[in-house]
Amino acid sequence: MIDKLLGSCHDVSQLLSKSMDTRLNWVERIQMRLHFRVCTYCLQFEDQLKQIRAAGRSFEACEFDLESSDDLSEDAKNRLRQVIRDECR
Ligand SMILES: [Zn+2]
């Protein structure tokens, strides 16, 4: 039950990506907040997404070094790559 409420890292990374484009509903927001309390990886992922957003279309965002982020799962890296591709178009 608690697992379902917290969601998986995969779920949360998708919610995070979605939250960059649209406002999440309250269930999704609570799920994310709860997940962040137990999962530092996703919390870091959110931070990195925010940094990329803040960087906007700047050169730094396009050069963001994912390979040095050993603490991110492959799934999270792929999500980040997608965001970077969108931002740098
Ligand atoms: Zn997680």
Image (cartoon, helix red, strand yellow):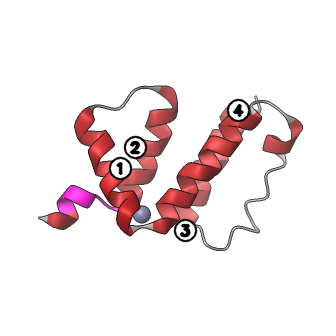
Which residue is at a point 28% across and 50% down the rendered structure image? 31
Which residue is at a point 35% across and 51% down the rendered structure image? 33
* Sequence-earlier tag: 3 or 2: 2
Q: Residues within 10 Å of mark 3 (few under 14, many from 20)?
A: some
The kind of secondary structure element at disc 4 is: helix
Image quadrant in which the C terminus is located = top right
Which residue is at a point 37% across and 63% down the rendered structure image? 37
Number of the label disc, if any, that sits on residue 32: 1
**Which is closer to the viewer, label 1 or label 4?**
1
Assess whether mark 2 and mark 1 are in contact (beta carbons under 8 angstroms): yes
Name the amino acid, label 2.
Leu
Q: Residues within 10 Å of mark 2 (few under 14, many from 20)?
A: some
* Sequence-earlier tag: 1 or 2: 2
In the image as oriented, which residue stretches furthest toward the bottom?
70
Marks 3 and 1, how far apart in space? 17 Å
State whether residue 26 is above or below residue 6. Answer: above
Query: Label 2: which residue?
Result: 15
Name the amino acid, label 3.
Ser
* Sequence-earlier tag: 3 or 1: 1
Q: Is residue 5 magenta?
A: yes
Marks 1 and 2, how far apart in space? 7 Å
Q: Which residues, given as a range, are shown in magenta?
A: 4-9
* Sequence-earlier tag: 4 or 2: 2
Image quadrant in which the N terminus is located = bottom left
Assess whether mark 1 and mark 3 are in contact (beta carbons under 8 angstroms): no
Query: Label 3: which residue?
Result: 73
- The reply, left or right, for residue 13 in relation to residue 87 is left
